[in-house]
Image (cartoon, helix red, strand yellow):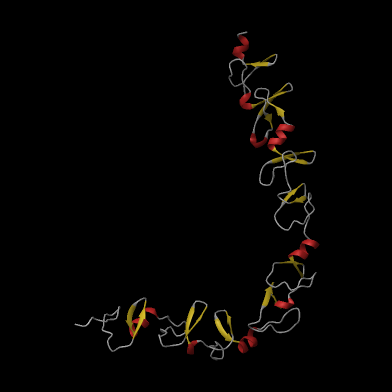
Amino acid sequence: MADRFDCDNCKESLYGRKYIQSDDSPYCIPCYDSLFSNTCDECKELIGHDARELFYEDRHYHEHCFRCFRCDRSLADEPFTNQEDALLCNDCYCNEFSSKCVACDKIVMPGTRKLEYAGSTWHEGCFVCHACEQPIGSKSFIPEKDEHYCVSCYEDKFAPRCTRCQKTLAKGGVTYRDEPWHKECFVCSGCKTQLAGQHFTSRDDSPYCLKCFGSLYAKKCEACSKPITGFGGGKYISFEERQWHQPCFTCTQCSVSLVGAGFFPDGERILCRDCHNGL
């Protein structure tokens, strides 16, 4: 008995019938079209295996359905424009939507490269830097009033300069005392660590990280000898030219906290009431 040769979908015999092989499986023509054919975006019918199919922006069309929305001209072999999801031949587009280049006052034809900005249109070659007069094309540009500059020319003409290195500050940066700085140039006057994004303070108009400021200028805690900066909400106690971190302000003899309590100085020592009374 001969081996069966059936459609992989409907299981009907394919002997003597046309079929299409897909992914190593055979299909009769009706099954192949129903399983694998795309739907025409215009007429909503399947595009059969033997029909010429056109594809545009994730949409599929029969050749005879791919036509100008206005004049019904076939666009299969013609240049066209997509205007608000309507396909238009060049003639219809020019009649309804063509704009003029603000530089040369000539029509910007469909299919030609153009630039649009702030409601105006330019031919690609007409959109030039106001300073160097070179075409900007697809490069970045910066508007200044009614003029446009390439980034290099704008930086030379308008961009602020870093207070430290005097090079242009194109983007980002830090403002300190109303002056611009590159992030990498704004550093601690002591250890040269970058200060952008962290707490810092200043002395004599020079910025310092908290560690350097505490080491160089802050008063020292009488108990632990570490700097008292007062930053970050840290509280401290001051008495007769001496200072303590709040947690360090304890009785010299019994170590009980003296914060908010009475205390008695005894030379270099400070004592709670009980220890003082026991002397």
Percent position of residue 46, x then y:
40, 83
Direction from residue 202 to residue 74 in the image, left or right: left
Tag count: 0
In the rendered view, tell whether residue 254 sits above or below residue 155: above
Nearer the observer, 17 or 10: 17
The answer to which image quadrant residue 225 occupies is: top right
Q: Quadrant of the C terminus?
A: top right
Please name the residue shown 77% across and 61% down the image: 155
Question: Please, which residue is most extreme toward the top here?
Answer: 279
Nearer the observer, 156 or 71: 156
Percent position of residue 162, x then y:
77, 52
The answer to which image quadrant residue 194 occupies is: top right
The answer to which image quadrant residue 49 occupies is: bottom left
Please name the residue shown 69% across and 16% down the image: 268
Percent position of residue 58, x then y:
49, 76
Question: Please, which residue is most extreme toward the front here?
Answer: 1
Q: Quadrant of the N terminus?
A: bottom left
In the rendered view, tell whether residue 137 sits above or below residue 159: below
Percent position of residue 92, x then y:
61, 88
In the rendered view, tell whether residue 162 sits above or below residue 90: above
Question: Please, which residue is most extreme toward the left here?
Answer: 1
Nearer the observer, 157 or 106: 157
